[in-house]
Image: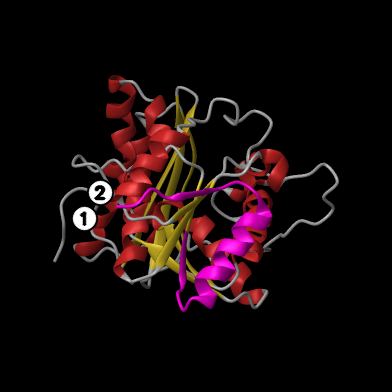
Amino acid sequence: MSTPLRLASREDLRAWCTHIRQSGGTVGFVPTMGALHAGHRSLARASRERGLTTLASIFVNPMQFGPNEDFDRYPRSLDTDADALEREGVAAIFAPSVEEMVSAGDRTTVSVRELTQHFCGPFRPGHFDGVSTVVARLFSLVGPCVAFFGRKDYQQVAVIRRMTTDLAMPIEVVACPTLRDEDGLAMSSRNRYLNPAARHQALSLARGLHAASEAYHAGERRADSLVFLARQEVVSCMDSVDYVALGDADSLAPLAGTVLRAPAVLAIAASLGGTRLIDNIVFGIDPSPIGKHP
């Protein structure tokens, strides 16, 4: 594998992507905030398996962090990340400074209505505007491409997909399955914050989703019952629970009090020792986080 080209400026990024297309290639784009794990690497692999020239970005986006969140301590490991991306055949890495991507003089933001009113939206005001604004800026620089995201951040993928559709962006958004450790814990950069005892407690998210999945596969379709089963596992182990909720797989509109029709997403957000974790499954698409159904 050749060493990925490192790009730091907007101009260099745009020029590189233009060169790839003019040479007959297609850019496969993997946007990340770094601190890469196997889930991120699987996105780069998915791009390579489609025969695309793969670009990864590493940018800890300050616009998506709230005032009491973990921007300053978010793990940063650029050289280690670059080595991992090289092993996955990534051709170039865009690793800009904050100043390169976010300016105090900026006056434009991108806001996706309705989808951001559910799940994490009420608990992280401005978060999704920060995500969609910076991702839109990245898409503008990269140009036509195939962009790969993980479904662990299900709401984020839904917001980005809607943004690209509504703004007629020449971007194909590919949502890849959540990768999990053998015990079912969803892979996350923030798992690094967890000591062994906390990590064991964090498994309650996967256990909650598993309990709901087992009931769903046994024929349970009452949304409130599925949420109750998942919530029971989580509340006893986590310090606080923002939500355990079922939503429509496309609009994310709440499904409480309904009889479930798949696909629908069951999502959880909870905190432990100052670390906020999220997880989800899509009924009708995803297997249980713990074990598999045919």
Q: Which amino acid does label 1 sit on?
A: Glu
Q: Residue 186 carries which label?
A: none
Camera-nearest residue between 141 and 197: 141
Label 2 to label 1: alpha-carbon separation: 5 Å
The quarter of the picture where the C terminus appears is bottom left
Q: Is residue 241 left or right of residue 141?
A: left
Q: Tell me if residue 69 comes above or below residue 114 in the rendering.
A: above
Q: What residue type is labelled 2?
A: Ala
Asked which secondary structure carries label 2, the reply is: helix
Tags 2 and 1 touching, CB below 8 Å: yes
Residue 38: percent from left, percent from top: 30, 45
Q: Tag 2: Cα neighbours inside 10 Å, few (<14), some, or many (≥20)?
A: many
Q: Please give the residue where the numbered disc 2 appears in the rendered image.
A: 211
Magenta span: 1-29
Q: How many labels does the image show?
A: 2
- Report which quarter residue 114 is drawn in: bottom right
Residue 237 seen in the figure:
yes
Residue 93: percent from left, percent from top: 49, 50
Asked whether residue 142 is drawn in magenta, I would say: no
Q: Tell me if residue 32 comes above or below residue 271 in the rendering.
A: below
- Scheme of image coloration: secondary structure
Q: Tell me if residue 212 comes above or below residue 34 in the rendering.
A: below
> Which residue is depicted at the point 63% across and 43% down?
64
Q: Residue 214 carries which label?
A: 1
Q: Is residue 39 left or right of residue 160?
A: left
Q: Tell me if residue 12 comes above or below residue 251 in the rendering.
A: above
Residue 223: percent from left, percent from top: 39, 60
- Report which quarter residue 46 is drawn in: bottom left
